Image (cartoon, coloured by chain):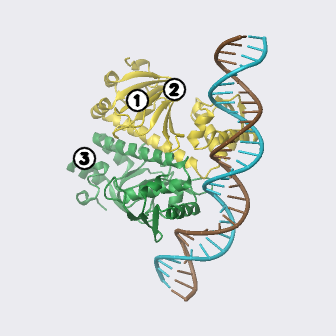
Chain colours: A green, B yellow, C brown, D cyan
Amino acid sequence: MSLSCSTCPVRDSAACAVLSEEERAELAHAGTARQLGRGETLFRAGDRDAACATLISGALKVTSFDAEGKERILALIHPAGFVGELFAPFPSHDVVALTDCRLCVFARTSMEAALDKHPALSRALLRRAQDDLHAARDLLALGSGCSADAQVGALVLAMARAASDSPCHPAARFDLPLTRCEMASMLGLTIETVSRSLSRLEKDGAIQRKGTRGIELLDPTRLEE
Amino acid sequence: MSLSCSTCPVRDSAACAVLSEEERAELAHAGTARQLGRGETLFRAGDRDAACATLISGALKVTSFDAEGKERILALIHPAGFVGELFAPFPSHDVVALTDCRLCVFARTSMEAALDKHPALSRALLRRAQDDLHAARDLLALGSGCSADAQVGALVLAMARAASDSPCHPAARFDLPLTRCEMASMLGLTIETVSRSLSRLEKDGAIQRKGTRGIELLDPTRLEE
DNA sequence: CGATGTCTTGATAGATCTCAATCTCAGTGG
DNA sequence: CCACTGAGATTGAGATCTATCAAGACATCG
């Protein structure tokens, strides 16, 4: 399937936005459009043929599995995000669709050629990599020193912000994009603990649950404790 | 103080290694050499004037502080490593010297100009950023699902590898570069738990402590459990 | 309506944190 | 030379938190 950048919803925010129309068209020619259903795997750790991709719509998760086979979510990728190893010989983590997704996939050789040809692209990807690094370190910082309630609260708040149109203020009412199981594996907790923390946050008047996924923010400041 | 790349120990491994002699000399002209003693701060979270640096010798830590003021180590930087925000308005984490250090410091504007001028530099930094991202995610994956003993064991093993000359085989005898307190804040544990884990690893015959910092690896395979 | 998967809630066990005491070691000064 | 001192490290006992196991509630879908 070919790519049609002209109607791409992330044409102004993805890494390729730094390219001119002609350059972008040329890069698009080297890439392929791809759709993934929820749960489908984009890259698998250890795959031979390394590739990379820009996410157009939907959400991805980057995961690894510990010794006992339990999944740990290392990162979430949102539209305009970029995934894939450009330098390591093979990917070391799985990348899986959290929701139905549309992506722009490139073979590594194509992307390397594009980096050589378009210096601005390297800078754009560098910026994204530093943002991702920042996100990973924030998740690390959140991880410990905090109670389970504080971790769940911070995650809910982060999702409220992601669900909002305005970047600063969190949405007052939204649906959690993750299942309890996924929330648990993002924080390194169990689903029971996540569920209990949500119950406590509700009893304390910080949030109100609307069905299984819906959340109404009553007192966002209490989520930060 | 001016930089003398010709005798720089990381001249072949740092990001600037991709530059030609003349290009490197020009970049060096824009940078300044700096020395830090153990415990001194290179960048502080929220600093106005963003800068970046390549580490020449010694070791740095990237840290943040949680609500109660406890430190959490987010990353270790080794020689040839690069630190600093190139795109965010200000650094969001502290960068502190773990040991006496020598560095090559650049104002952000200088580095941005260099990136514009030398496309290869963007690629080199992109590669480093992806490596750092990988390290941060590995630390995340290590964090949970493992017992404290397994975490401490993995950290000891990682340090044995870092202390070794050959990249693959861990050093059989080496000194821990981190205090117990620093090991604890890397793993999100307390120093008591780290100490107890080391005691158990010693009792199980995996390691033998030589003084407070010295470690002798008896059975590296047991550290991975 | 029953079936299935997800989520919630409860009781218990296990692990880590906290608080506190002791120990080691290097540096200091008498 | 030796005792003193202070920082870091080790060890112990109890409190606290989370994981585990188990059961029940809820929603979705056929």
Considering the image in quadrants, where does the N terminus of chain B appear? top left
The subunit carrying tag 1 is B
Amino acid type, callout 1 = Ala
Quick check: can you spot residue B143?
yes
As helix, strand or loop, the secondary structure at mark 3 comes to: loop
Check disc 3 and report the residue beneath it. Answer: A19
Q: Residue at x 61, y 32 (%)?
A: B179
Amino acid type, callout 3 = Leu
Percent across and percent down for residue D10 are 72, 36
Displayed quadrant of residue A175: bottom left
Amino acid type, callout 2 = Gly
Q: Nearer the viewer, residue B20 or C15?
A: C15
Residue under disc 2 on the same chain as residue under disc 1 = yes
Rendered position, B55 above or below B199: above
Quick check: can you spot residue B13?
no
Whole-angstrom CA distance, mark 3 to mark 2, is 40 Å
Rendered position, A63 above or below B194: below
- Name the side, left or right, on which B30 lies relative to B103: left
Percent across and percent down for residue B168 are 59, 36
Percent across and percent down for residue B216 are 70, 32
- Name the side, left or right, on which A136 lies relative to B167: left
Check disc 2: other Cα within 10 Å, few if <14, some if 14-19, many if 20+: some
Check disc 1 and report the residue beneath it. Answer: B53
* Residue A51: assigned label: none
